[in-house]
Image: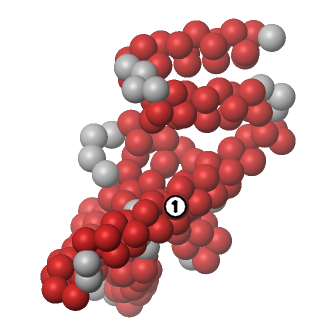
């Protein structure tokens, strides 16, 4: 193998290992950290490409962060890059979760564990909202329909999460409203 491809593999491994090691909250919370590293730090993809990759990864079955890392890894270094990205993103998180679960069960009360979970949920909400802002901010300035569509997306998210709106009905309502907004 040549040195350039090995450098790409190593870069994918170190970047996604750090993300897996230091990110919490699952796929959606991790997407902003992946975006920062893939777009701002490494320059593997542009902001627009990341938006497309995120859209595709959400549409695919599976975890959004793993799908996104797989697509980015494939773009950077082919099939082996995709495999390296998935494994290096997953393995540190898995080891940390198992370690901390055992540690928390031994030394903390159930109430302290519940408080920690609540704090982590709020941290994930902040990361997800930052990702939504990062991706949608480029769209808002490019055309006039993006701001209403972003607001519509947030309303749909709230309805799905809080009011137990059926996801198929929500999707149909979103498509109808988005079509109406785009025609205005």
Left or right of 24 in this view: 62: left
Can residue 157 be seen here? The reply is yes
Which residue does the image show at 38% across and 36% down from the upper left? 59
Q: Nearer the viewer, residue 22 or 87?
A: 22
Instruction: Give the colour scheme of this rendering.
Output: secondary structure
Q: Nearer the viewer, residue 66 or 48?
A: 66
Left or right of 66 in this view: 156: right
Total numbered labels placed on residues in the image: 1
Pinpoint residue 115: horizontal percent, then vertical percent. 40, 69
Q: Quadrant of residue 97?
A: bottom left
Which residue matches tag 1?
122
Which residue does the image show at 74% across and 41% down from the upper left? 139
Q: Quadrant of residue 176?
A: top right
Pinpoint residue 18: horizontal percent, then vertical percent. 41, 82
Pinpoint residue 46: horizontal percent, then vertical percent. 63, 59
Which residue does the image show at 80% across and 11% down from the upper left? 184
Give the quarter of the figure containing the N terminus: bottom left
| Label 1 SS | helix
* Relative vertical location of residue 117 with respect to residue 52 in this rendering, above or below: below
Can residue 88 be seen here? The reply is no
Which residue does the image show at 42% across and 22% down from the upper left? 165
Pinpoint residue 104: horizontal percent, then vertical percent. 24, 81
């Amino acid at each position: 193998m040549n040195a350039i491809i090995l450098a790409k593999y190593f870069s994918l491994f170190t970047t996604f290992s750090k993300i897996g090691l230091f990110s919490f909250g699952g796929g959606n919370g991790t997407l902003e950290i992946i975006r920062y590293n893939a777009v701002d730090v490494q320059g593997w993809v542009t902001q627009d490409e990341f938006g497309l990759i995120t859209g595709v990864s959400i549409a695919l079955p599976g975890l959004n962060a793993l799908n996104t890392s797989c697509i980015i890894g494939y773009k950077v270094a082919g099939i082996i890059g995709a495999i390296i990205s998935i494994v290096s993103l997953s393995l540190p998180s898995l080891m940390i979760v198992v370690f901390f679960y055992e540690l928390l069960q031994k030394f903390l009360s159930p109430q302290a564990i519940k408080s920690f979970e609540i704090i982590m949920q709020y941290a994930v909400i902040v990361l997800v909202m930052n990702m939504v802002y990062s991706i949608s901010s480029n769209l808002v300035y490019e055309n006039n329909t993006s701001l209403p569509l972003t607001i519509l997306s947030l309303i749909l998210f709230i309805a799905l999460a809080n009011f137990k709106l059926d996801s198929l009905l929500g999707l149909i309502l979103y498509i109808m409203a988005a079509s109406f907004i785009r025609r205005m």
